[in-house]
Image: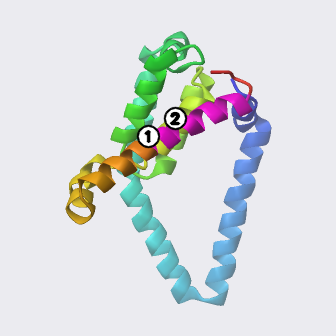
Amino acid sequence: MTGRAQEAKGPAGRRRGTYLLVAAATAYLAAALLDPLRTAEALKFSGYLGLRIAPIMILVIIFMGLMNHFIAPKTVSRYLGRKSGLKGWALATAAGIISHGPMYVWFPLIQDLRSRGMSNGLVAVFLCCRAIKVPLLPVMLYYFGWLFVVLLTGYTLLAGIAQGIIMDRMTSEGV
């Protein structure tokens, strides 16, 4: 497990979460005292946003649970670890391209994969390749043409891979 993952799961991580919750509640209380109508609007919007991301979060949590039950850390390390080779890079690239929803809902899953052996470079590739949106490619083709879309997609893939390699080297994981 990485140092950050251990921090977040220990008592200090729980304390930090409690502080954040208390700070947010205090801020909302102060805002409610200063401007009750706008605070009510903000809470309503927060609830709306929570309802929009809830289905995605539930799917990610279910996926993480299934992964924890059926996939051993050794398997993750084999397919997404430092020694996974081209297979790992291809898998991280493809997963980044086909993943949907807000990026932040993927963070818990990625952190879990990192704790099981996923390399930092493959995390970077996954996050970079999320910029390629398959459902939007036809719209881009319509507005910008084939050459632009092919070049942009190719450059995005190359940039993601380059960032993954740089990340691995900078975090001393090797390639």
State the extent of the magenta-drawn residues as a range: 156-171
Colouring rule applied to residues:
rainbow
Q: For the residue marked with disc 1, what is the amino acid?
A: Leu
Q: For the residue marked with disc 2, what is the amino acid?
A: Ile
Relative image position of residue 1 (x, y in whole percent): 69, 23
At label 2, counting other C-alpha atoms closer than 10 Å, the crowd grade (few under 14, some 14-19, many 20 or more) is many
The residue that appears at 60% across and 25% down in the rendered structure is 119
On screen, residue 141 versus residue 106, left or right, reads left
Q: How many marks?
A: 2
Q: Main secondary structure of the magenta part?
A: helix
Q: Are marks 2 and 1 in contact (CB under 8 Å)?
A: yes
Q: Is residue 68 visible?
A: no
At label 1, counting other C-alpha atoms closer than 10 Å, the crowd grade (few under 14, some 14-19, many 20 or more) is many
Q: Is residue 161 magenta?
A: yes
Give the label on residue 157, or none: 1
**Residue topped by disc 2:** 161
Of helix, strand and loop, which one carries label 1?
helix
Q: Is residue 90 visible?
A: yes
Q: Between residue 9 and residue 109, name the one nearer to us.
A: 109
